[in-house]
């Protein structure tokens, strides 16, 4: 096995290079070797100082996250962190000046190693940070104790609670970094280290005292941070835990603070919140790996794009291209519709500008990349076209037939359809190999998910190019199969079915929405439908009825169609599941009409309405999602369960700290999920049928992600 650290003496300075690709993560071997080589350097007469640097593109990007899965208990964690803390004190006690030379990222444990060094130098574009809260943990290698001593409690609190990286120049100004190296990093670091040695400088971060005023100010900052986290960190535990650890360090000496940090860390690392967030860390990276589309599949560079349809979705999609610096044609059937679409786009940019996130100049330059048109002129120059016309099969097929004649043979033809059969568009275009779905989520310029629907004939190069494009558009691209509703909306149909039925059985719209938002979703099912438009769902049901299908097995509530017939489409019409102050307003109030409709429909179905518990609502909805998700996997329309979790986290805002609907089902326990499906079948009917995959996993004592040994993840 290749050595993960290298040692050399250059110009009288010992250079320790961490070489553990791809991101120099602190695996157990790296920790061990670092300890050894710092000791070796101190014993090496040829070295007057020591530099620690990363090989490749980055310094250390943190502890090896995979290791945390081996920490089953708090005790496991305490034992391991005890070793780490002692190791960092040993290197901090280096007799020779120890300099961390930072390029790329110094994150988490990587920054903590740098903090235990006596000095830190960095190149200008380096980033440093404590992103542990993004993984549901806190800095566990002394960061909550050393960082405040370097930059003060306030910045340390921000860095440890929002997890965002800080650019090196800002870290320099804050006292974390001691010098920005302009030229080549290693020689700059060696020069700096030699100067420290000549000056006899060593500075142990843990010995930098907290001044009395700093402690007082720091404690105030802790209380203020807790207050603001109540708004910004709803449902999360780790950010509050980071404040507790920093506060402990302000109230006691380094050693006592470190013990407190280790205890708090141990509690976090075994929590379901952390397991869920670690699961998503890797799941977000796995989605880009499509089994039969190898990493070296040739891709095309998308330099020019076009969008057909300037409605809400088309306009948002065009903004994605323009935001990525890609010139885009935006086509509409007539000038009026085009002007309407452009006005919405400009309004969106004006709002962003009013929030200080764009300058006037940036708005004008970005808008200039969007070329409005009412013809196909110029379409023969583009690399990709995204169709975003009305969700109507005939209209879409006509559009694809036209696109097949006005674009180059190698142009990618993508559809923003949210439900319809991609293969039919592909056939209509005359070049099915170039066709796939690019299903954006509303608002398309905001939501990060891009569901990429693979047709029977979609070429691998088109898939690979789309995955690369997704990164360029700052989207999370997930490749899914071509079934009705694909993954996102196919499962959503079961989520909505249960919401409608729970309403008819006795729950209320505000209750159901409150329960789901308390669960962590940004909006409940009814609030969401009022935003997306009740008419959209109605037209899909009409299309399905025309081909003899429904969106989900089981009883179909008539309430949404009755609202549609009343012209209650939601926010845009000023009434839907809620009443709104005016069309377009977001201010809503519960509408007694909905209760009346629920009473009427319940009577028609012979149901006695009764109070429904919040627990029942969560259980029914999450069970429906997990069961249908298992079917999607069984049918092969998703590659991995974790892809489904990524779809729901990025498409619908399913709470990250619950890991997504499939991970959540594992935390509940699949035996319980199957038992619930069977209970509902007995109570409501055969349309509740356990997915074969669910039954298989339970019979093998497994979960979607867990093997026999650790099925019992401590429930949320
Ligand atoms: N551990 C294990 N694997 C990691 C890793 C890590 N820390 N970071 C990245 N990888 C893998 C990743 O899964 C992918 O693998 C490959 O490296 C490239 O990553 C003690 C407790 C550094 C900004 O949270 O944010 O330190 O898919 O695709 O876009 O207090 O990776 O190729 O097989 O993301 O260039 C804190 C996590 C850990 C930083 C680079 N550190 N990493 O982004 O590449 S906790 C973090 C990142 C800790 C201490 C605590 C990003 C990156 P594969 P990538 P990238």
Image: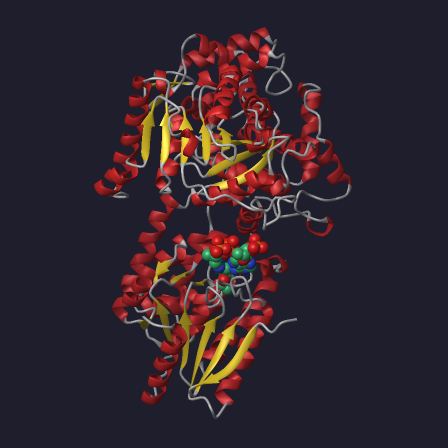
The residue positioned 54% from the left and 68% from the top of the image is 81
| Residue 125 in the image: above or below residue 355 | below
Question: Which residue occupies the foreground of this view, 156 or 169?
Answer: 169
Percent position of residue 84, x then y: 53, 71
Q: Is residue 144 left or right of residue 430?
A: left
Can see residue 267? no
| Residue 231 in the image: above or below residue 621 | below
Question: Which residue occupies the foreground of this view, 271 or 537?
Answer: 537
| Residue 60 in the image: above or below residue 279 | below
The residue positioned 27% from the left and 31% from the top of the image is 346
Percent position of residue 178, x then y: 32, 73
The quadrant of the rendering that contains the C terminus is top right
Percent position of residue 552, x then y: 61, 21
Residue located farthest toward the right when viewing the structure as drawn:
699
Question: Which residue occupies the foreground of this view, 17 or 298?
Answer: 298
The quadrant of the rendering that contains the N terminus is bottom right
Percent position of residue 638, x then y: 63, 36
Can see residue 196? yes
Q: Is residue 364 left or right of residue 189?
A: left
- Coloration mode: secondary structure
Residue located farthest toward the left when viewing the structure as drawn:
360
| Residue 408 in the image: above or below residue 57 | above
Question: Which residue occupies the foreground of this view, 50 or 613?
Answer: 50
Q: Is residue 548 left or right of residue 127?
A: right
- Number of callouts: 0
Q: Quadrant of residue 541?
A: top right
Residue located farthest toward the bottom when viewing the structure as drawn:
45
The residue positioned 62% from the left and 27% from the top of the image is 483
């Amino acid at each position: 096995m290749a050595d993960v650290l290298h040692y050399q003496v250059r110009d009288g300075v010992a250079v320790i290079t961490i070489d553990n690709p791809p991101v120099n993560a602190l695996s157990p071997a790296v920790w061990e070797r670092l300890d050894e080589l710092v000791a070796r350097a101190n014993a090496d007469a040829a070295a007057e100082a020591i530099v620690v640097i990363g090989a490749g593109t980055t310094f250390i990007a943190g502890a090896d996250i995979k290791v945390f899965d081996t920490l089953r208990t708090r005790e496991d964690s305490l034992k391991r962190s005890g070793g780490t803390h002692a190791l960092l004190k040993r290197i901090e006690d280096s007799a020779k000046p120890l300099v961390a030379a930072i390029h790329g990222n110094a994150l988490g444990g990587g920054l903590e190693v740098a903090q235990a060094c006596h000095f830190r130098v960095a190149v200008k574009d380096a980033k440093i940070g404590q992103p542990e809260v993004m993984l549901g943990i806190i800095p566990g290698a002394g960061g909550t104790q050393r960082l405040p001593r370097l930059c003060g409690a306030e910045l340390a609190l921000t860095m440890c609670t929002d997890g965002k990286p800080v650019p090196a120049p800002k870290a320099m100004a804050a006292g974390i970094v001691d010098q920005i190296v302009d030229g080549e990093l290693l020689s700059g670091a060696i020069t700096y280290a030699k100067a420290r040695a000549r000056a006899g400088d060593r500075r142990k971060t843990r010995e930098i005292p907290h001044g009395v005023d700093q402690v007082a100010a720091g404690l105030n900052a802790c209380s203020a941070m807790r207050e603001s986290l109540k708004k910004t960190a709803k449902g999360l535990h780790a950010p509050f835990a980071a404040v507790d650890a920093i506060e402990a360090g302000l109230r006691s000496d380094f050693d006592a603070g470190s013990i407190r940090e280790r205890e708090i860390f141990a509690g976090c690392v075994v929590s379901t919140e952390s397991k869920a967030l670690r699961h998503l860390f890797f799941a977000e990276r796995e989605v880009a790996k499509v089994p039969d589309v190898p990493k070296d599949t040739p891709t095309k560079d998308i330099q020019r794009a076009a969008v057909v349809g300037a409605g809400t979705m088309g306009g948002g999609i065009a903004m994605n291209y323009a935001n990525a610096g890609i010139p885009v044609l935006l086509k509409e059937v007539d000038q009026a519709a085009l002007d309407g679409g452009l006005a919405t786009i400009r309004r969106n940019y004006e709002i962003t500008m009013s929030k200080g996130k764009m300058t006037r100049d940036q708005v004008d330059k970005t808008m200039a990349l969007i070329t409005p048109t009412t013809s196909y002129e110029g379409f023969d120059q583009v690399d990709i076209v995204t169709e975003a016309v009305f969700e109507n099969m005939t209209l879409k097929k006509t559009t694809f037939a036209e696109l097949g004649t006005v674009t180059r043979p190698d142009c990618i033809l993508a559809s923003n359809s949210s439900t319809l059969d991609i293969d039919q568009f592909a056939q209509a275009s005359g070049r099915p190999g170039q066709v796939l779905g690019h299903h954006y989520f509303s608002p398309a310029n905001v939501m990060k998910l891009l569901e990429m629907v693979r047709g029977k004939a979609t070429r691998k190069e088109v898939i690979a190019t789309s995955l690369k494009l997704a990164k360029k558009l700052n989207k999370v691209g997930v490749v899914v199969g071509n079934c009705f509703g694909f993954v996102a909306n196919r499962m959503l149909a079961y989520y909505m079915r249960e919401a409608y039925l729970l309403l008819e059985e006795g729950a209320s719209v505000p209750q159901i929405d409150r329960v789901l938002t308390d669960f962590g979703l940004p909006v409940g099912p009814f609030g969401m439908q009022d935003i997306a438009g009740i008419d959209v769902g109605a037209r899909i049901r009409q299309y399905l009825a025309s081909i003899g299908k429904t969106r989900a097995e089981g009883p179909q509530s008539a309430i949404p169609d009755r609202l549609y017939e009343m012209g209650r489409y939601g926010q845009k019409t000023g009434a839907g599941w809620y009443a709104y102050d005016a069309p377009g307003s977001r201010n809503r109030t519960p509408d007694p009409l909905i209760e009346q409709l629920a009473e009427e429909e319940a009577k028609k179905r012979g149901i006695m309405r009764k109070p429904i518990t919040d627990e029942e609502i969560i259980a029914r909805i999450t069970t429906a999602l997990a069961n249908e998700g298992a079917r999607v996997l069984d049918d092969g329309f998703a590659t991995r369960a974790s892809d489904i979790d990524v779809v729901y986290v990025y498409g619908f805002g399913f709470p990250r700290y619950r890991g997504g609907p499939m991970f959540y089902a594992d935390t509940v326990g699949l035996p319980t999920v199957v038992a619930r499906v069977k209970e509902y079948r007995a109570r409501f009917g055969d349309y509740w049928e356990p997915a074969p995959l669910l039954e298989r996993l339970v019979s093998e004592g497994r979960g979607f992600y867990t093997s026999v040994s650790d099925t019992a993840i401590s429930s949320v």
